[in-house]
Image: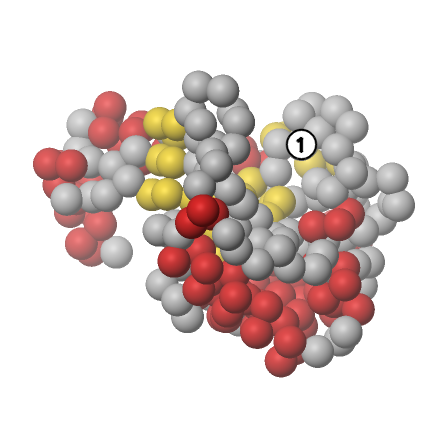
């Protein structure tokens, strides 16, 4: 942290913004003069996705794109096997590193509260204890291969309809007992290197600007 604090003092405002702002699909800016590299990312929870053309959003066709298409996180969690979760994570991490990725946007650990959620296939289930137990070895498996896990979507992203502006209203007891335990384990027990903020609002504030969260 001391090293980073020193670097941040040397950066211009524009350079600081570059670290936070994408320069193209799945790639964030770096600061070349300070030897801070760009970060290259990939979805996702079910396997390393193909790369996209910057102008057309079409997938690039390349024989090196062949990777393992994994079962859904729902299927993984239904095994109740933490060993299998670790192996699952290692596949994601190894193949992401093999494709030159620094971060894989996985795992998805929002709690399933409605069968109508369009991203349910990315999530593990409705039980916060099960999700918390499975996510720890999965993240550790990913990060064994010098790839950052990016646990998502923090927090309360439980529907896709109007996800950019919907507001989740949740009392504190429910928040702490249902929606946040798996995220806590992802950070404290697994040491996830990154977290993806959710687009939605939580109790009046957007999640990425929510002091309580």
> Does residue 173 appear anywhere in the picture?
no
Residue 107 is left or right of residue 62, and the answer is right
Q: Where is residue 97 in the image (x, y as percent from the top left)?
A: 38, 58
Point out residue 182 in the picture as x, y percentages from the top left corner.
Answer: 66, 61
Figure quadrant of residue 109: bottom right
Going by the image, does 15 lie left or right of 40?
A: left
Q: Which residue does the image show at 62% across and 80% down from the upper left?
A: 83
Q: Where is residue 59 drawn, in percent x and y?
A: 52, 33
Q: Where is residue 186 in the image (x, y as percent from the top left)?
A: 56, 63
Q: In this view, does 51 lie above or below 83?
A: above
Q: What element carries label 1?
A: loop
Front in this rendered view, residue 1 or 130: 130
Figure check: 49 above or below 46: above
The reply to whether residue 82 is visible in this rendering is: yes
Identify the residue at horizontal 69%, vertical 24% (top origin).
165
Q: Given the current orientation, which residue lies at the most extreme right position?
A: 115
Q: Is residue 160 left or right of residue 68?
A: right
């Amino acid at each position: 942290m001391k090293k980073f604090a020193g670097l941040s003092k040397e950066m211009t405002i524009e350079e600081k913004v570059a670290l936070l702002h994408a320069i193209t699909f799945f790639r964030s800016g770096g600061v070349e003069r300070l030897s801070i590299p760009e970060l290259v990312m990939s979805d996702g929870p079910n396997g390393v996705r193909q790369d996209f053309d910057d102008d057309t959003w079409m997938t690039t066709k390349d024989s090196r794109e062949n990777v393992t298409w994994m079962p859904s996180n729902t299927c993984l969690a239904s095994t109740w096997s933490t060993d299998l979760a670790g192996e699952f994570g290692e596949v994601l991490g190894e193949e992401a590193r093999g494709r030159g990725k620094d971060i894989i946007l996985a795992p998805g650990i929002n709690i399933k509260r409605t069968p109508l959620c369009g991203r349910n296939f990315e999530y593990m289930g409705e039980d916060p204890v099960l999700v918390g137990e499975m996510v720890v070895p999965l993240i550790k498996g990913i990060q064994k291969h010098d790839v950052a896990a990016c646990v998502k979507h923090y927090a309360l992203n439980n529907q896709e309809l109007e996800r950019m502006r919907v507001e989740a209203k949740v009392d504190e007891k429910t928040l702490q007992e249902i929606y946040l335990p798996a995220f806590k384990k992802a950070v404290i027990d697994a040491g996830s290197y990154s977290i993806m903020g959710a687009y939605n609002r939580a109790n009046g504030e957007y999640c990425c600007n929510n002091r309580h969260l």
